[in-house]
Image: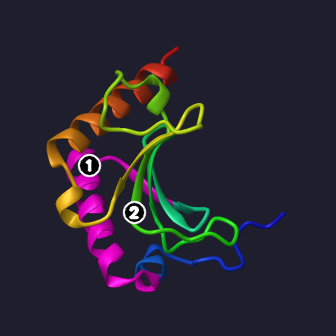
Amino acid sequence: MKFQTFKFRSVQEFLDYLPSEQLDIVIQLRDLIFETLPNVKETLAYNVPFYRLQKRIAFIWPGAIPWGKHTKPGVELGFTLGYLLPENKYLNKGNRKEVHIKTMYTVKDIEVATIRQLLLQSAELDQLKNNI
């Protein structure tokens, strides 16, 4: 079953697609990720940017990018190793086993210090998992 009917060819094409309120959030999150983890690589998967060191550690999923036929408000910042991060009240596990997310509806929802800490913890976990 195909969950999306289109495919972006570049991150810029992805950014150009976004409504302005989601674009502002995405740009600030991308900047924060690149500032915090300068060696991180950005690639598109499922039409959204994923960030990897050895493996994928995070992604940004704007609600304007559908999963199936469903779009939603806000922008999700997901941590693929969320299940290994120290327990916190910031991220939402929902009914997922591994990925934990935080949904932001405005740029004011971006908690820079908390996100930076989670990114650094994710990078450390990525390093540990790949040295085992």
Residue tagged 2 = 75
Position of 105 compared to 70: left or right?
left
Badge 1 crowding class, 10 Å Cα cut-off, few under 14, some 14 to 19, many 20 or more, is few
Picture layout, residue 34 above or below residue 1: above
Q: How many numbered marks does the figure carry?
A: 2
Residue at point 36%, 22% (across, down):
87
Which secondary structure class fits the magenta region best?
helix
Position of 6 compared to 90: left or right?
right
Kindly identify the amino acid type of the residue bearing the numbered disc 2: Val
Secondary element at image label 2: strand
Q: Specify start and end residues of the magenta stretch as a single range.
A: 16-43
Quarter that holds the N terminus: bottom right
Percent position (x, y) of residue 47?
57, 68
Residue at point 52%, 14% (across, down):
132
Q: Nearer the viewer, residue 4 or 52?
A: 4
Q: Is residue 57 magenta?
A: no
Looking at the rendered structure, which numbered label has been put on residue 18? Answer: none
The single residue placed furthest to the right in the displayed view is: 1
Instruction: Decide which of tag 1 and tag 2 comes sooner along the chain.
Output: 1
The single residue placed furthest to the top in the displayed view is: 132
Badge 2 crowding class, 10 Å Cα cut-off, few under 14, some 14 to 19, many 20 or more, is many
Percent position (x, y) of residue 3?
73, 66
Position of 106 compared to 74: left or right?
left
Residue tagged 1 = 38
Q: Is residue 39 magenta?
A: yes
Percent position (x, y) of residue 63?
48, 68
Mark 1 and mark 2 residues within 8 Å of each other at the beta carbon: no
Secondary element at image label 1: loop
Q: Nearer the viewer, residue 24 or 47?
A: 24
Percent position (x, y) of residue 69?
68, 72
